[in-house]
Amino acid sequence: MPATKDEVLAETTTAWAEYSARLATVTDEDLCRLNSGHGWTLKDVVSHIAVWEREAVHVIQALVEGREIHDYADFDPWNERFYNEHKDTPIDQVRTEAFAAHRALVTMLQELPPGAFDEQVVEWAIGSGAGHLREHISGFPA
């Protein structure tokens, strides 16, 4: 796992390039039809990734500021909640939010001082960013 700000940003950039290149080849029709293996459409997966990148922004900011964060040890209830909140979001809005959420995460990471990249921050940046993108990319057509 990356350990420094530069390594986190490099990993995030590389993973996003791979993910966004795949996403660009998938039509809106296919995003709504294809099943990811989770019982979700690929649109749901795109939304899921965007939601977790947004959540990472809030969590990392809280960590840096020394505030407490929610207990995320069991992701399933969070995934279910986020899915239910976003399952009816129109596809164009999902695509827009995917890029906006990623930009927000990268901007926040770029603005953090190098010393802020402790184990928890790196874990959230990679776990909800690059690692999460790579976890789901295999569900998209090559």
Image (cartoon, helix red, strand yellow):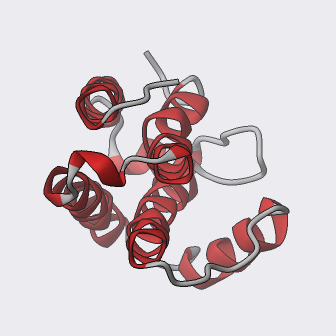
Q: Is residue 1 above or below residue 142?
A: below
Q: Is residue 124 above or below residue 57?
A: above
Residue drawn at x 34%, y 32% is 4
- Quarter of the image with the C terminus is top left
Q: Nearer the viewer, residue 86 or 117?
A: 117
In this image, 96 relative to 23: left or right?
Answer: left
Q: Position of residue 15 (x, y in %)?
A: 36, 27
Q: Position of residue 58 (x, y in %)?
A: 42, 75
Residue farthest toward the front in the current orientation of the protein: 115
Q: Position of residue 124 (x, y in %)?
A: 52, 52
Residue farthest toward the top in the current orientation of the protein: 142
Q: How many labels sit on residues?
A: 0
Q: Position of residue 100 (x, y in %)?
A: 22, 64
Residue drawn at x 34%, y 34% is 8
In this image, 7 relative to 62: left or right?
Answer: left
Residue drawn at x 53%, y 24% is 1
Q: Nearer the viewer, residue 21 or 54?
A: 54
Residue drawn at x 38%, y 67% is 57
